Image (cartoon, coloured by chain):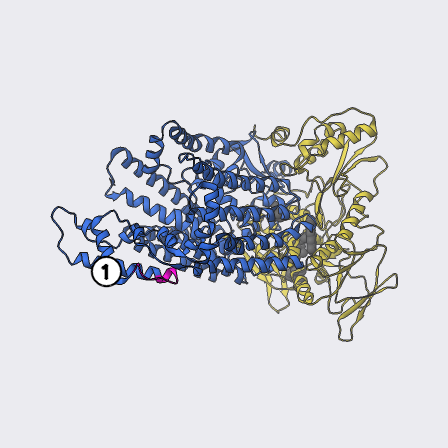
Amino acid sequence: MTVLQKIGIGLFLIGICVFTAVLGLDSYKLDPSAINISNEYHQAAFMEAAKSTTLFEQEYPSSANFMTALKTTFKQAQNSLAGQTIPDGVGEWDYKLGDWKFKEYFKDDIFKNASFGTVNDNPIMWWLLSVGLAMLGGLFYIIPKFSDRPGIKSNGIFHSPMERGLTWKWRAALLGIVIPGILLYGFFYSYDWFWPVVTTAFVSLIIALVMYYQGSKDNNPQRSAGPDFTGWLGIVTGIYMVTFYVFLYWAPHYITGWATMFDPFSYALNGGPASKWFVYGMLYTIIIIVMGVRMFAKYRHNKYQLVRTGSVIFFQTAFAFLIPQIMSLLEQPLLSKDFKNIWPLDYEFFFSYNLDKLIEGGGLGIFMLVWGIVLIVIAVPVITYFYGKRWYCSWVCGCGGLAETLGDPYRQLSDKSLRAWKYERWIIHGVLTFAVVMTVMTLYTYFSGNNEVLGMNTEKVRSWYSFLIGAGFAGVVGTGFYPLMGNRVWCRFGCPLSAYLGLIQRYKSRFRITTNGGQCISCGNCSTHCEMGIDVRSYAQKGQDIVRASCVGCGVCSAVCPRGVLRLENGSGDIAERTDPIRAIHITEDQIKLLS
Amino acid sequence: MHIAIIGNGISGITAARYLRKLSDHKITVISAETDHFFSRTALMYIYMGHMRFEDTKPYEDWFWTKNRIDLKRAYVSKVDTANKTLQFSEGDDLKYDKLIIACGSTPNKFGWPGQDLDKVHGMYSYQDLEAMEKHSEGLKKAVIVGGGLIGIEMAEMFHSRHIPVTFLVRENSFWNGVMPPEESQMINREILANGIDLQLETELKEIIDDGNGAAKAAVTSKGETIECGFVGLTAGVSPNIKFLADSGIEMTRGIMVNEFLETNVPDVYAIGDCANARNPLPGRRPIEAIWYTGRMMGETVAYNICGKKIAYDPGIWFNSAKFFDIEYQVYGTVSARPAENHTSLYWEHSDGNKSIRIVFDKENNQIIGFNLMGVRYRHEVCEKWLKDKVNVEDVLQNLGMANFDPEFFEEYESDVIALYNKQAGKNLSLKKRRGLNAVLSFLGRGK
Ligand SMILES: Cc1cc2nc3c(=O)[nH]c(=O)nc-3n(C[C@H](O)[C@H](O)[C@H](O)COP(=O)(O)OP(=O)(O)OC[C@H]3O[C@@H](n4cnc5c(N)ncnc54)[C@H](O)[C@@H]3O)c2cc1C
Ligand code: SF4
């Protein structure tokens, strides 16, 4: 490691520490004018309660203290309303204050607006000391890699405490905490037991199907699932990332310090204050750029990787981040959208609020509606037919972009076992089914006005999907688990768009990874470095081309193969027999007949 | 019928897999090395941290039970062919009806003084890897003896951990017994560029004992004494057949086999690195210690045992390797000392790290071989050209079909043709660029 790299690590660590500390620096003081509850009874009761708790008079040193005071006041208002008789003609819950109203009335911007102190006074300074230093540190660490000789640089990944992965016990423990944790939280989140229980039943069903019906129970030990070492730094990183997502989705009140720090950028780009989504979007873009530079250094002998990395950086920076910002600045809310986001990944596309917005938006709105539908029914099948699902998953998509840059150091941690593949197929197609059913129900409600289907409330289905898949799966597990289970956990197991693209790729596409005759030496580099957990070697050593629904065409198997065995390519000549295992079979039936 | 297989390398395992595909016989695979088949060719990547040992196993551990292939971890100390019995070093034994010997190779030792000291190892087995790992802790210098494919891999391994290496090579240019001079020199440059102390025309004289039975220095034929904590012996391999000494099986350097891979003893077969062909096919060596031939022999022997007799025919020669960052592929005949009638078109990239050599018959212009450095070519296309003895000018005009480099990589086929035109005074041009569709129709696929 060079001196510059050591300095880089130091700066990065300082940056991360400051970034975390920023959340605790400012204090909070609430102005009465910030409370504008539309329900007059609730407003009055709350203001009344605030007097007795002196909510508006005090300064709170931390978001946690402030939250406690807010909750105490809310409770008091709740109690005072509960003790009174409901006036005639007023619905029970229009008068009484329900628990679930807290989330609705007190969004994170209340916290952001109530905060004051050094971060509010010097947002740019704190941004530079946190994000800026971490970025600089990252670049210092990466830049010296350009002086290595070009070529595959995977030395020591399985010796690194950051990249070598977990023992299966650790993996099981972390999954065992996070998944039930999310379901349990879902119970409180949705104030309903129905969907958490249904989900638990489905999870159990899938486990039973894979283990008993498909006979995976005896397939022990799994390959690549049980290394003998545990990368403690990876575990720390994973926990940090999981925590980040949990706060981002479900406890944004505590992280408004970041939004404060990002305000100047937000004002400059879109003319408004920074929301948590602005913070997330900008961080996401910065990370893809910085880690994209790392990709340029690492794969600079491989032009496919360079072009592809350039592409994900471009689509993230321009399409996902800048264009929507600039469109809001130009007061074009209809165009302030990620043009490349496609249903069902963009699961809100058919939500009534979005449809209303588009339909009421005149020509532009209709254009956006048609554009979205064209992407789904024409672009996806046609482009996938020509180039495979890679055109989206590893060239355009933002989730894919993060996986291919930030996630690249962890690609070797995906589970290659047959058992994992079985789980993958049930889960990802399960999510696709869920997405379709949820969308159909939503549309039914949209057109009929009836919000009950088979006794299920479509609104609740929608919000459970957003909670479970949109936040829990795509964010907390999908990204938080990079250092724990590889960088494509979401794309491999969860993404419904990936499932849709995959079905087309598997059944009707010119794309495949060609195996170069008999040249494979079964070394396993390709399988090890496959982020989708495809056992590439099992095909290559048979001389069979690789046609798999999950393949995102990142091209790394081809890059790391020491014998030049693999090539990603498209050809229409033999679509029907792409999957035939014909080539490295050395002796054919004909030859035997001739001799015997 | 019970078929016993000695050796769980690529040869023995391929035999077992095909036996299972073709029959219902009882199969036992015996190895002293590891419980499960792993890829020997990937040993270096474990040391370099690209993979774990787990990742080098081509099949998951449950595969063997599921396919009813019994595995036995034991060392066969004696083969009693009269009683069809294997005797193990632990004292137990095993009866067989048919025996396949696939016992592989062992690193050569040429009687150097000190060759059996501690910290002196070849790089062949999993145990050798463990030894390298053990001795790498705090290692300041390693000396590697023997300039072959395993030697250069060992150099790369130490280099990956920043351990300085002195590489003693007997020849005056790396691997020039196999490689034509230009390619050989390209490898020399690559070795030096990686900071390896490459000493050509230098041999090992002796290894000095540190007083505790371990190596402390190597003395070279040039009289230099190199202090080192590890000596790697990589001067080739030979069949690992000592344990067969009085089994009645005929052996010379390896186990003698006919074209059906049968030994002189009925029901005993030999395949892979340890097999020595009685009548090698034209242009082929009696022992070919490479992965691919082991795999093909494993398949052939299974057919023969299952009563579908077929002669071993490895087809057109091919091989590949990697020298640090330069990949190498060969198809057909490319020789360091070409036959009289062979000539070659040699194109080298200006960066000095890539080359394409096309060997052909100067009398009738028939294609003979391809040698690629830093460029990937398509096996089946080259093979078809070679089999059909196509005219080199046809090959050149369609050369794009052979290109197997990833998308966006530069294509050099036009440069190769330009060179040919210049040398032969011709005016050919490239008709087919890289791409799959032309290849599919050339190979007659998808019809
Ligand atoms: C480091 C390295 C890199 C290589 N790279 C390449 C490459 O890139 N390309 C290529 O084509 N070839 C390569 N080779 C050569 C290739 O690996 C061998 O040709 C091939 O593995 C031979 O397979 P095999 O099945 O014949 O024997 P082996 O793989 O040697 O298997 C024989 C097994 O039998 C066991 N055995 C032997 N005797 C007994 C006994 N008495 N009792 C019990 N068990 C016994 C041994 O322990 C061993 O496990 C490489 C070899 C090495 C060492
Ligand atoms: S990396 Fe290449 S040689 Fe190794 S197993 Fe994969 S395809 Fe075969």
User: Residue B343: percent from the left, percent from the top?
Assistant: 82, 35
Residue A105 to residue A568: above or below: below
User: Residue A207: percent from the left, percent from the top?
Assistant: 39, 53
Instruction: Say if residue A472 shows up in the picture.
Output: yes
Q: Quadrant of residue B82?
A: bottom right
Residue A413 vs residue B242, the one in the foreground = A413
Q: Which chain is home to disc 1?
A: A
Taking the image as shown, residue B129 lies to the left or right of residue A64, namely right
Q: Residue at x 76, y 32 (%)?
A: B416
Instruction: Say if residue B303 shows up in the picture.
Output: no
Residue B134 to residue A276: above or below: below
Q: How many marks?
A: 1
Residue A461 vs residue A333, the one in the foreground = A333
Q: Residue at x 30, y 55 (%)?
A: A188
Looking at the rendered image, the quarter that the N terminus of chain A falls into is bottom right
Looking at the rendered image, the quarter that the C terminus of chain A falls into is top right
Q: Which residues are magenta?
A: A55-65
Taking the image as shown, residue A122 lies to the left or right of residue B426, namely left
- For numbered disc 1, what is the local secondary structure? helix
User: Residue A568: percent from the left, percent from the top?
Assistant: 59, 38
Q: Is residue A64 magenta?
A: yes
Per the rendering, the colour in which chain B appears is: yellow
Instruction: Provide the letter of the chain coloured blue.
Output: A
- The residue identified by callout 1 is A76
Considering every residue shown, the one lying at the far right of the view is B222
